[in-house]
Amino acid sequence: MDIGVYFSCSALIILSIFALRFYLKPRIKNDETDIYSILLILTILGLLLEILTCIWFKMGVDVNDFIYKFFSKLTVSYYFIWSALFYKYLLIICKSTKKTQKIFNVLIILIFMVLMFLPMNFYQIEGIITPKGIMVNVVYVLCFIFTLLDIYMCIKHHKHLTNSKFTPLYALLVLGSLDFVLGVVSPQLFLIGYIFSLIIIIMFFTIENPDVKMIEQLNIARDQAEKANNAKTEFLSNMSHEIRTPLNAIDGFSQLILEENNIDTIKDEARDIMAASQNLLEIVNGILDISKIEANKLEIVNVEYEPHKVFDELVKLTKARIGDKPLEFKVNIAKDLPEYLNGDYIRLKQIAVNLLTNAVKYTKNGSITLNVDVVKKDNVCRLIISVKDTGIGIKKENLDKIFTKFERLDLEKNITIEGTGLGLAITKKLVELMHGKIVVNSTYGKGSTFTVAIDQKIVKKVKTIKVVEEEKTTKQVNLKGKKVLIVDDNLINLKVAARLLLSYKIETEEVSSGFDCIKKIEEGNKYDLILMDDMMPKMSGVETFKKLQEIDGFDIPVVALTANAIAGMKENYLKQGFNDYISKPIDKKELERVLKTYLKAK
Ligand code: ADP
């Protein structure tokens, strides 16, 4: 048997394995994988035909037998069809038009049909049967033309030739030329079918056949990103509305105050301005909390506290929120709630406030119930706080979405209810950070119950209690005789800070730039404290602070007083060397803490 058939057999085995791998693995349907699939099947069929005709001949078939001739013609045509389809692969990777590809398909079919009718016969050299005749010559010419076309493609797309998709083409040109030389030296070494198989194997690694699973994951990730993006856009437009509402109140009432002479009316309007400012601050704090959560900067600070006081405050706050809404507020606090606990009571309060605020917001009438139960074990007290309302409820399909940031649901019903869609996302994260759990039960149209379970340590003996301490700080302190330099480029901010300090009888001086601040110190002016804004034009607060440090004998405490309050800012300013940090708008308690720390009586 001629050597070529052994090559064909081994190629058939290897190619079948590749075919199995190709068809068993999920694949992307595109033009490249389609043409590869056709070429793969065609090559396997071609190898089978080569082997079949060879064995058939060895078995002593009459070469003029019609069926043998038909199969031999198919085998010869196979070389033409393969060359043509390989060229089509090149057309595809070179992004030729669909129309060109269609015309090409029709041409191949027509030529194939003509070929099958052309005469073909055989001759034998050294016992090897070789087909000859017009059909064979035409196929040789056609294959040669395709080789020229392949080379033309190489030249035409020379800029992209480093693309791995062209590798099968180079392999074909090199191996084809080698086969041509071998064929001249040793005619029984007819290896073209074997070479086609090698090309198909190379193509397996170069065609665009990305991992389907990866694509699916990418699609999911893209969908999620799109969803998040849409939610953010919605959040921004919602936020713009949320921020403008209190701003409108602040602006409107301020104008009214200017025109008003009655001191009581002015006081009323000032109170409304304060309420609107508080609302605005809550929105901004919500955004800051989310940014801290995303930057993993939100920390739980455990201190000793009196839970009764925390819940009393919550009740007061909720009653104020309910105002004149027709809502009954029921409170049941466990009798055995420990007197003192250790935990982050500020965050605990924030969680409960969020749930109670939502209950008030999403309930038109009926009742809201705050239940606080405790389960004690050793020195741990599990606080089970549940907030029940008879409000609008949440649809089943929305239950798992409510804890997603920026998600606001049932907007057609909630359109008039203010909200940012951040509250529950923050709440859930806080509960998780405190190693607790939050669950929600809701019946659409009837009401919802949010339940939170958080473990807190029971404290037996108490040294310092935060809540009590805070109450003390609210008493006004007299710091007469102290002098503070305020540095801020914004004149209104200067005025606010100076006015706040005046209420402690502190003498102030105000400058509106870092340069003026340095000048004052260099002139030998003495201060007990400097409050320094950071974001100032020309010279920032940080730059001013650095320059101050270079002045001989400078030892005045400098506190960053800035609206730059995103995650990690406090740590950042302390790292720069500032003695302390207060964020704007100024919280009176914070200001007092700083004043007490740095302006001790001499
Ligand atoms: P929002 O600022 O919109 O209130 P939240 O994160 O607090 O943001 O709540 C997310 C969404 O969950 C709300 O928009 C609302 O659709 C729903 N929701 C929250 N609490 C309740 C409740 N008690 N009753 C009904 N729906 C609620």
Image: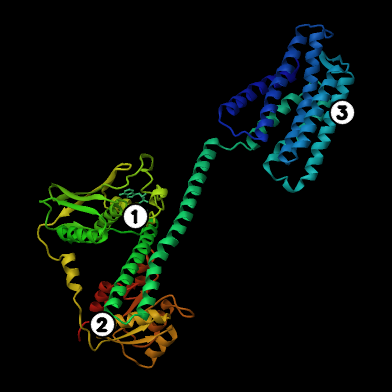
Does residue 1 sit above or below 110 in this rendering? above
Question: Considering only order in the chain, which callout, 2 or 3, is on the residue closer to the N terminus?
Answer: 3
The image quadrant where one finds the C terminus is bottom left
Q: Are marks 3 and 1 in contact (CB under 8 Å)?
A: no
Q: Give me the residue at 39% from left, 49% from top.
A: 413
Task: Report the front residue among 124 and 392.
Answer: 392
Residue 30 visible in image: yes
Find residue 245 and report its horizontal and vertical position in percent.
40, 64
Say which residue label 1 marks. Answer: 423
Q: Which mark is residue 503?
A: 2
Between the C-alphas of marks 3 and 2, the distance is: 103 Å
Amino acid type, label 2 = Ser
Residue 531 seen by the camera: no
Pointer 3: residues within 10 angstroms few (<14), some, or many (20+)? few
Dot 2 or dot 1: first in sequence order is: 1
Marking on residue 463: none
Q: Secondary structure at mark 1?
A: helix
Given the image, on which type of amino acid does mark 1 rest? Gly
